[in-house]
Image (tube, rainbow, N blue to C red):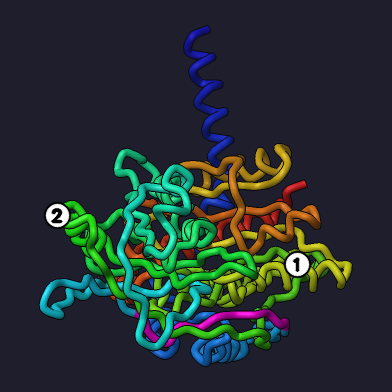
Amino acid sequence: MKKTLTLLAFLSLLLNGFSQNPDSVFIKTIFDNALTSRVAYHNLEILTNIAPGRLVGSEESIVALKFLEKYFKDLGADTVYLQEFKTHSWACDSSSVSILKKKSREIHLTCDALGTSLSTPPSGIEAEVIEVQGLADLEKLGTEKIAGKIVFFNRPMKDTFINTFAAYGDAVDQRAHGPAEAAKYGAAGAIVRSVTTSLDDYPHTGSSRFPEDVRIPALAISTIAANLLSQELKDNPKTKIRIFVKSHDLPEVTTYNLVAEIRGKVKPDEAIIVGGHIDSWFNSPGAHDDGAGCVMSCDVLRIFKELNIQNIRTIRAVMFMDEEMFQAGGKAYADFVGQSGKRPYLALEVDEGAFTPEGFSVDAPDSVVNKLHAFKSLLEPYGIKYIRKGGGGVDIYPLKNLGVPLVAYVTDPQRYFDMHHSGNDTFDKINYRELNLGTGCVTTLIYLIDKYGVE
């Protein structure tokens, strides 16, 4: 009896292995292609070289769009077009921060203006600095102690968080809302410790949200600069600094999302979207954020074409514009497809850099999450540890209102914020193997969704 049960168990495992074998074999073909191709890696090198600082409204952002538009056309995508929309934007020409010492001496601190910062007068603003650890400190200090001063937000990202995205979420309120809150108490300006886990001399910029009627000059300084300034304030609480920002608003710019697709052979109106955002901050080549996500999404179409996969549904790559400033591209695209009456089948966003694959998070009903989770065993040999409920991504989030299931590709987070929104986000920080493993994982999940559906 024991031998019979053992034999039956062995046969069951064997049959199960055979039933998965066709998918496993083809998935290996996908990864063999992804891991031996240098197309995505080469495209990213070109993108970061010809169009660094691709902030919406800049010439560089259009250069980037044109480059990938040509790539898709040369690839032979069935449809390639620029989806036009209008938005407002902002641009920075220059900025500086200096500690003022005796005898007209200055200590220059590395800095970059924060998005939507107001310009200073041409001579800058000189004022005493008041250091705080967060927004709650502003209320405690009040207008009497803040008015006319430059508020210095200096709470670091906590090293005790294992997931650096959680650490970022814990600290980023200082950058996103701190300057506007400081303005309410009459602050002359604001500087913010870069939201990064690194101790280096790269300033990390980002958006700062202001109400229309209240704006002040606002800058990010590097973590080394923040430590230096904090020590100066300990030595002399009356320390003064000079801040300078030259920036200007762009009330209305015409820009585009780039769309390319391989038409579905059976259900062409059911589109599986894969994409990233093509814009990057003015101070950054944007290699990991999010040039990598764009070229990986492009490579999905290349692999489908090269392997002659007869996709059931349309595979659509979208390069979203303006994720960094106002998220206008994602909203414009959702409006566009909503008006067309053709709701996308599913959307997958690639915007966590080209690091080692970890998993996929899914913003969808449990039935969809469970269907996608069933694919995990096929992806485990390639580094995918989980497919579970979670967030779907900033650019595709507006599609949730249309009932579209959302998926985000997730990578190892430990190095991401070393480079995020900074001049350190350069092509040389890209690991060829990690980039291509990500392409393979994303392509495989899309292949399985197309083949088996998520109903």
Asked whether the viewer can see residue 372, the reply is yes
- Is residue 305 a member of the stretch shown in magenta? no
Residue placed farthest to the left in the image? 103
Q: Which residue is mark 1?
A: 334
Say what amino acid the circle numbered 2 marks: Asp
Q: CA distance from mark 2 to mark 1?
A: 53 Å
Q: Which residue is mark 2?
A: 235
In-front residue for pair 401/237: 237
Q: In the picture, residue 389 is in which quadrant?
A: top right
Callout 1: helix, strand or loop?
A: helix
Q: In the picture, residue 93 is in which quadrant?
A: bottom left
Q: Label 2: few (<14), some or many (≥20) within 10 Å? A: few
Foreground tag (2 vs 1)? 2
In-front residue for pair 333/296: 333
Say what amino acid the circle numbered 1 marks: Ala
**Horizontal side of residue 196 vs 400, given as left or right:** left
Q: In the picture, residue 220 is in which quadrant?
A: bottom left
What label does residue 87 carry, if any? none
**Horizontal side of residue 85 vs 57, given as left or right:** right
| Label 2 with label 1: CB-CB less than 8 Å | no
| Coordinates of residue 171 in the picture (x, y in percent) | 42, 49
Magenta region, residue range: 85-95
